Structures are given as C-alpha cells and as structure tokens.
Image (tube, coloured by chain):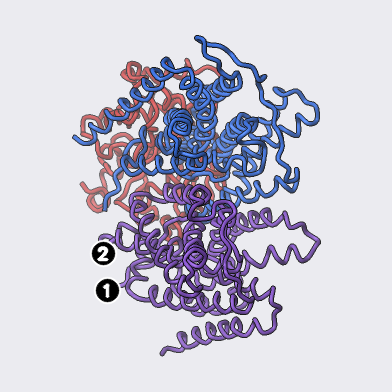
Amino acid sequence: MRARATSAIVPLLLAACAVFLLVGSLQSALFAQLTVSGLANGGIYASLAVALVLIYRATQVINFAQGALATFATYVAWQLIAWNITYWLAFVLTLGCAFVGGIVVERVAIRPAGRRGSVLSIVIASIGVLILVEGSIPLIWGTDVRFFPSAFPARTIHIGGVAFQLQDLGTIGVSVAAVILLSVLFRFTKLGLAMRAAAFRPEAARLVGVRVGWMLSIGWGLASALGAVAGMMAAPSPSVLLQPSMMDGILIYAFAAAVLGGLESPAGAVVGGLAIGALLNLLGSYVGWITPQLLLPAAFLLMLAVLLVKPSGLFGRTSVRRV
Amino acid sequence: MAPLLALHDVEARYGPVRALHGVSLTVGEGEIVAILGANGAGKTTTLRAVSGTVRRDGRIELAGRPLSGRGPEAVARLGVAHVPEGRGTFAELTVWENLRLGAITRRGSLDGDLKRVLSFFPWLDGRRGQQAGTLSGGEQQMLALARAMMQRPRLLMVDEPSLGLAPLVVAEIFRILRDLNDREGTTVLLVEQNARNSLALAARAYVLETGRVAFSGPSVELVRHEAIRRSYLGY
Amino acid sequence: MRASTALRLSVVGAVALAIALMPFVLSDYNRSQGARVAVFFIAILGLNIVTGYTGQISIGHGAFMALGGYTTAILTHSHGWSTLPTLPVAAAVGFGAGIVVGLPALRFHGVYLALTTFAVALAVPQLATNYSHFTGGVEGLPLPTHTGLWLYGLGWSAAAVVFVCAWLLLRGRTGRAFRAVRDSEVAAASAGVSLAVHKTLAFGVSAAIAGVAGSVYVLTNNFVNPDIFGLTLSLYILIGAVVGGLGSLWGVLVGACFVQLLPIGISNSHTVSAQSVPVIFGAMVILVMALLPRGAAEALLVTAGLPKRLRRVHSSPTPQRLEAQ
C-alpha cells in the first residue's frame, strides 16, 4: 500500500513542479527569466549528472573526479581557442580529447584499483584522480582566473514580450542535445546495446563475445565527454569563471540531481538537474535570507531529504536490504 | 576425423579450491554429448573451463585451435556458445535485444539468422518488445537457446536446461535440441542432472565424480549398466 | 602478559619516547610543524574509526574539524575562555555533530554516504562564511598565540590521550562489534550486534576526535577562517588514512607524516615546485590503491622485516570470523 502511494507521489510532484514553473512564468516576466536562467544552470547540472549515472550504472562507483576532468577539458578548450581555432571546432576537438582522457583514466587509475579491492578502493582512486587532475591545472596553465568565451553571442531574445538571454537558451539546447544524442547511441546502436549489456550483466555479456573491459572504458570516455560539455557551458558564466575549482560546487549539484533521479536513471538525472537549477535560482531571488552561500547547503539538504524519504531516488527502484 | 572439442587433463579451481582434477573428453563434429554426475561433480566447471570463465590449466582445443589462455570473449568469438546455469538472459533488455546480442560480434544483416531462429521458436516473434525478465522460466530458457543460436555456434554448450522447469517444458526443450542437431548439424555439449532424458538425447556421455571422469561411453551402454545407473545416475 | 603484547607495547613505547624527545632537537618553527603532524594524526585516527573499523566512507571530516576549531576560537575570542578547557568542549560538539550525521547515515550505504559527507565538507565552509556574526565570516577570528613547544606538547598530549582512549575502546567488545559491522553487516546483526547503535557511535566518537584535531589545528594556525577548512583538508585526511592504511593504527602515524611533511619537504627542496604537491598526492593515492591496498604502513613494515604479530596494533582489515561473546 505504501509503495503504491509513493510511486504515485513522484509524477504528481513533478507535474506540480512543472505547473508551478509554467504558471509563474506566465504571470511574471522576472519569474520567467529566473526560470530560464535557472534551467540553463540545470542543463549543466543535468549533463554532469548523466555522466555520473553512466558510470554508476556500469560499475556501482561514483566518479568523484567527474568535475575535475570536466574542468581540465575546459582548459584544453580554452587553449585551443587561444591558438586561434574557431569555437565550434575547438568544442568538437575538446570532446574528442575528453573521450580519450576518460578512457586513459579508466585504464590507468581505475582498473588497477578495481582489481585489488572493493568499491571503496575505486572511489578512493577516483578521489586520487580528482586531486591529481585538479592539481595539474595550475602547473600547466598557472593560477590566474581566466575568461572562457560563450558559444553564443550575448544577445537577448524576446519571447512573448519577455527578454531572455540567448546564452541561457543556447545552454539549455546544447545540454539537452548532448543528452539526447547519448540516449540515441545507447538505445539504437549496436555499440550502445553492447554497452548496456556489459553494464547490466557483464558475465553474460562476455559469453556472447562482448569485450566488457572496453565497454567500460568507452563508458568512461563518453561520461568524460559529457562532462566536458557541462564544463564548456558553465565556464562563461561570470559567477563561475575558468579556474581549477570551477566544477567543485557544480559537482555537488550534479550529485544531488543524480541522487534525486535515482542513481541508475539518466532521465531522472536530467529531470533532477533541471528542477534543481530552476528551483534554486528562484529560491535565491525570491527568498530573502537565502544568500548565495546558502544555496549549496540548500541543495545538500534537498538531497538528504530525498534520500531519507525515498532512498532509491525519485525514479529509482527500491531494493530491499533489511536485516 | 579430429574431434571438434578436445580436453586433455584439464584442471580448474575456484580460488584455492580445486574443482577439476584432470578431465579429458572429446566431442565430435555434429555429435550430442552429455556430461552427467551428482551435484558438485564438476559438470558446470567443465563447461566454464571451455568457455574460459574459470581459471584452468591443461589443454583445451576447438578444431585444433587452443582455447586455453583465452578469455570468454575470445572463446565466444571462436564459435562457442555457452548457455550458462541460470540461463544468462539479459532480464533488463527486451526479447529482441537479447536476440540481437547473440549476433553482436558480427556485421551485416541479421534477417537470415532471425528467420532461422524463429523457425525453431515461432512464439518469440510476437514478443519482441517484451522485457526478458518477465518471461516464464521455460520461455527464458528457450530465449537463451535462441540467443545462442544467433551466434551461429560451432559448439553449443548448455548447462542444466531442465533446472526448475516442468516436465512438459523440459521435454519441449530437449526436442528442440534434437531438432537443432538434426536440421542444422549443431554440435551440442550438454550438462544435466536429469540423466534419463539426457541419455535418450545424447549419443555419448561422460559421468563425472569429484572432478574426474568416472565412466564414459555410448549412451546405450551406460543405460544398460545397472550399477552405474544406480550409483551415478540415480535411476 | 604474552610475549607478543609485551613486544608490541615496547615498540609503541619506543615510538612515543622518540616523539616526546624530538622537540628538544628541533627549531621553534619545526616544533609547530610537528604539532601539525599531531593534528593530522588525531584527525586520521578519527577517520580510521569510521572508515577503517566500521567501513563507512566519510569524506567530510574536515567539517567536524571545523566545528571543533570554531568552538575553540569562539570560546577563547568571544567568551574569554582559556585554551585548554575548550578542547573537551570541542570534542563534545564534535560528538554531537557526529551523532547528527551518523543517524541519517544509517539509511545510506557506501556511495550515498560518500556523497553526503563530500557535500557536508563543501557546505560547512559556506555556512561559516554566511553566519559571520558568530564566526567572523571571511576574515575569521584570531586565537591566542603560543610557543612552538607549547603547541607541540598540546598536540601530542592530545594525540596520546586520544590514542589510548581509542585503543581501549577498540580492543574491547565495542571494537569487535565495530569490526563485525565492517566485515558483514548482515552477519553482525544476526549475531545481535546493534547496527544502529554501533554505526552511529562510531561516527560520534570519530567526529569528537576530529573536533579535538580541529581545536589544535586552529591553535597552530593562530587564526581561523572558512578557507582553512576547505575540501582540501577533508581530502588530505582521507589521503593520509588511505596511504597509511585503513584499519591500521601504525598507518595513522605514517599517513600523518606523509600528509604534513611531504609538502614541506617539497617546498624546502626547491627542485620541485610547491604547486606539484597535489599532483604527487593524487598519484600516490592512485598508486597505493593499485598496488598496496593495505596501505603504505603495512608495506613499509613488511620490508622492515617486522613479523606479522608486531605489524598489527589491532587486528587486520581482512574478513574475520565473529568471536564468540
């Protein structure tokens, strides 16, 4: 009886959220603008969250280095642009580098740790990668904070009489497009099927000839590339800027989004990310005592609340572990 | 004629525990061979040794090519289809995706293979979109066989297909195995506890006891030998 | 007393003596660095209780240190307390916070706990910045100054007290219960070990210890502000615990020396840039995870030829049978 009640709550909650955002936007121009810019942040959280879910689904490991890898990729992009390569070409090249980087990290740092120990060892190894990668950035590029150009010109677009930033709309578009592309890969291609099989049942997958080890590495590569998208979308924002610790806070929001969605569901991570982005932005503006510093703790408390009520996340399946 | 599969003095272990103490057997092309024995005799381990899912020593050859030292992915690509204990179906994926995974290592169109496979399991056609985990035990077993067939295997290894299934379903599965062997000439290596059905299906059989081959020979002889039947085959 | 116990105690005694005598050969600056090593010793010991002994991952111990540190700072600065009495208060505050975190943590496992503690580690400095009325915000609060020798003495006395308390706690029933929880929760619960009580208790004790570490930390620093309790601190404590060896008390000393002294060695050597410290740390963690899952302490002691019984001040991290109670 209780299970049925909670499974009805989730879609109701989401519908209520969506209605709230829609009605508010129709009522107030400010609300609409805050929602859209919040969704833009949410798109960034969602991209990183999907990257986390990708890896978690296959390995039961949370990659703590996901943010740092994204930051590194963004610096690579910055470097390419500084060498006078056009933005979108640099974007694509960076995705390629991030993909390769992810594969290298998995093979060199993660695989050896997994061989010896438990999930804990792999998590700690990923923390080692976090420290190493974030620490290597100042060595290569120095400690100055840099500006990263946006993919979109700083124009405003008028929809229904309300002015929106093109950058925000563009960010939402790029994030959603990236996630959709990944979805298509997983659902409709042979590679995607092999990867899903390797993630769900590695032993059975081996018996059909799937090279499970490579599937894992490619998974890390794709997650890394997705993180790079998040990084390149986040860096232009004046509250973020290109610096080594750029993605630390965003990683928390991505965790919250992934957890909200139930760590195994990419769709949940997307919805979670967008929701967190929009709601936090609105909270920050409309509720006076919530200063920018309190947003992170607020997201954390939200994550905690969800975990306490429904440990498997909003979209996850509950697995009973009673003693 | 050289056998399709040959094992010479194969040993296998799970960590420090030795499960096989020097097993030798052969399977000829086009044959159906059964491996029988009590629980813990090493039947499943023998199949695992061939497919490379357990640590093993000794010589294993498929049509003369050594399998020892190769992992399961490589062995599968050489033409060995292993339907493990518990079926190994991908419960989270659909029937169609399960079948497709059988041919995942090959390029080109699957239509021909699909038609072939559906001729043995016509009921699968209407269930393509169904999640494999929601199929009944017998249906999952047949899906596993179908998927193995999609691999166009030179050697089909099936581990305890009758486990947990009703006698009627078991009879159906054995009929399909016979059909496969007749129509397609698929070589089958079958591990079973159900000795009676297996000896009716297989031409030859090996009886294992605590990791060694205790008896072997044509099925007709094993059936006639009462002492063996009583002590090892349970009937 | 068995021979092996006597041997163990004499090794511990020898090390303790060395630590006690060291400040007399060190400069004043180096003495306060030695005090810093004590800080990490205490913090890593605390982390070990939660992660090494009960198997719950925590990447947020810097937050508990922050609570202890701010307690000391606020009491001495705003309320005129003298330094020493603030330490037990810091421990109590830490204990309370540990229970508060530990209770919901019961419902999480492995990854979720790591996530939550990671978030806590990032959230606490933000909170400290925000509630500047208490905490002095970004500028922070000043602390009473002490000589290097005093700090060294305080740090290592606290370390000794904490060590002895932990040792006593862990060798008894509670310790066995902790290890049982780490090795198999299901088995432990079936044997009547209350999971809730022991896991939460572990968190409480661990956080109390971290609180004490935080107090000494801010004293060695002479001031407190949110920056010194950033994510880096929590990560370094974890690194120290991991490199030293989870579940190993020797490892705590090795880890603390590693985390505090390596950066100093590097900046003193002038050959390698100080900025490469994180890179080296990260690489070390990866290497240790790949090659030495039991930690460097174990490996060092093996190469030193110490027999197995001496290498362990407590029992091993490998799965053990439950002892009959």
Q: Colour of chain B?
A: red
Residue at (76, 29) in percent of width and height? A81
Q: Colour of chain A?
A: blue
Q: Which residue is at the front of the view, B124 or C229?
A: C229
Image hue for chain C: purple
Element type where label 2 sits in the image: loop
The spot of residue C53 in percent (x, y) is: 42, 65
Q: Foreground: A317 or B93?
A: A317
Q: Position of residue C65 (x, y in %)?
A: 50, 61
> Residue drawn 61% across and 66% down?
C222
Query: Circles 2 and 1: CB distance less than 8 Å?
Result: yes
Question: Relative to B97, is C99 above or below?
Answer: below
Q: Is residue C31 left or right of residue B50?
A: right
Note whether A271 is above or below A242 in the view shown: above
Q: Which mark is residue B108?
A: none
Q: Residues within 10 Å of mark 1 (few under 14, many from 20)?
A: few
Residue C325: which disc? 1
Question: Dot 2, crowdedness within 10 Å: few (<14), some or many (≥20)?
Answer: some
Q: Amino acid at mark 2?
A: Ala
